[in-house]
Amino acid sequence: MYVKICGLQTPETVSAAVEAGADAIGFVFAPGSPRTISAGLAANLGHCVPEGIETVGVFRNQSIEDVVDMARRASVTTVQLHGDESLADMGRLHEEGFRTLRAFSVNAYNALSVEEKLAWQSERILLDAVEPGAGVTFDASVLADGAPHGFWLLAGGLNPGNVSALAAALRPSGVDVSSGVESSRGVKDIALIRSFIEAARAGQPRHAQ
């Protein structure tokens, strides 16, 4: 089970996630979030991350030029787009040498046509609740045509107490968490990070990235 811990802001929480076995560490660059950090801080935190673990910059409805510039300054390996970005934007990021994730709310994913879903199948997908970052899970029964067929991450309202059951039921390639490992909004809890990763991996086969 691929595990991404997102919204990290301190060396202590980054180290805890790495030591607990996270596959990816997420840094938020989208404006307006209590988890947003600067490119410089992300670059410094990335020094704590061993090669082989993805460092992910999360952006939302920012110009692709700004995304590329900030991602380079932050020295992240992967860019996650969480707004209305297009397949062409993803292609630009690949050309610039980044791995990518494209996040959709479950409603936005349902609104895609069959042809659009097929087109997005070549990308790694993250499915989130209707209101990202609010700690609310989505009901899998609302996935009109089922989950994506390729690599996809489940997000939205996950925590150490529910991740194992939800992952078993929905069978994603991996899981992504932010608010579910916080002691208060925007403040990560080291014990919860460790508990989440342990719970996510309990009885789960590991998927290819």
Image: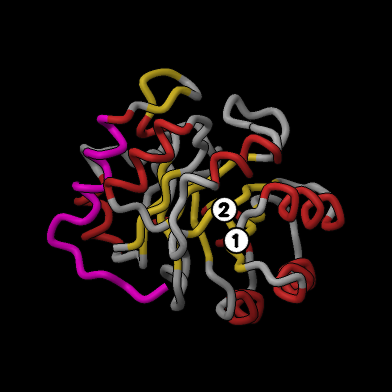
The residue tagged with tag 2: helix, strand or loop?
Answer: strand
Q: Which numbered dot is residue 56?
A: 2
From what the image shows, is residue 189 above or below residue 60?
above
Give, as a single range, the part of the protein colored magenta: 191-209
Whether residue 208 is in magenta: the answer is yes
From what the image shows, is residue 54 above or below residue 156?
below
**Front one among 189 and 151:** 189
Residue under label 1: 77
Kind of residue sitting beneath label 2 = Val
For mark 1, does the 10 Å Cα neighbourhood hold few (<14), some (14 to 19), or many (20 or more) residues?
Answer: many
Give the residue drawn at x 34%, y 26%: 189
Say whether disc 1 or disc 2 marks the residue closer to the N-terminus: 2
Left or right of 142 on screen, residue 33: right
Quarter of the image with the C terminus is bottom left
**Front one among 79 and 40:** 40
Q: Image quadrant of residue 208?
A: bottom left
Give the residue drawn at x 32%, y 73%: 207
Give the residue drawn at x 47%, y 21%: 185
Query: In the image, residue 188 lies at what x, y percent?
Result: 41, 27
Kind of residue sitting beneath label 1 = Thr
Cβ–Cβ under 8 Å for marks 1 and 2: yes
The residue furthest left is 203
Left or right of 190 on screen, residue 28: right
Mark in the foreground, 1 or 2 = 1
Query: In the image, residue 183 lies at what x, y percent?
Result: 36, 20
Left or right of 152 on screen, residue 205: left
For mark 2, does the 10 Å Cα neighbourhood hold few (<14), some (14 to 19), or many (20 or more) residues?
Answer: many
Query: In the image, residue 202 lies at what x, y percent?
Result: 15, 55
Give the residue drawn at x 62%, y 50%: 57
